[in-house]
Amino acid sequence: MSHLKNLSPEELTALANLAALAFAEEFDTDELNVLGNWIIVVGDIMLVIAAQQQFLSSQSQEQKPDVQQQIKELQEQLKALQKQMPPNHPG
């Protein structure tokens, strides 16, 4: 699929048009309806997969600062507790 990265939007559109025209020459109306709907379903599923991947990626990126913030807060709490300890306390 790395070839997709090398195509401009116009080239990709032209390629889709060529594919549609080639299918139209080979299949009758009923077959075109089935094939077209099948392609739409495959595309919809691909979009759901991509959306979920993007969502999960954004969630993990959002959680990283939260974890770092929690670590910072815990370190501050630890320092505050250490200040409350008597000077001769081991630790």
Image (cartoon, grey):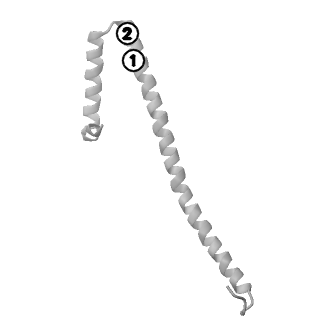
Q: Earlier in the sequence, mark 1 or mark 2?
A: 2
Q: Which residue is mark 2?
A: 31
Residue in front for this viewpoint, 37 or 89: 89
Return the residue found at the far front.
90
Residue tagged 1: 36
* Residue 28 placement (x, y as % from top left): 33, 6
Q: Quadrant of residue 3?
A: top left
| Nearest to the observer: residue 6 or residue 89 | 89
Q: Residue at x 60, y 69 (%)?
A: 71
Q: Amino acid at mark 2?
A: Glu
Q: Amino acid at mark 1?
A: Gly
Q: Residues under labels 1 and 2: Cα distance?
A: 8 Å
Residue 9 spot, x, y in % from top left: 29, 36
Apparent side of residue 31 relative to residue 72 in the rendered image (left or right): left
Q: Position of residue 37 (x, y in %)?
A: 43, 18
Q: Residue at x 56, y 66 (%)?
A: 68
For the point 24% across and 33% down, which residue is it?
Answer: 11
Q: Is residue 37 above or below residue 30?
A: below
Specify whether 87 is left or right of 65.
right
Image quadrant holding the N terminus, namely top left
For disc 1, the neighbor class at 10 Å (few under 14, some 14 to 19, many from 20) is: some
Q: Position of residue 32 (x, y in %)?
A: 36, 12
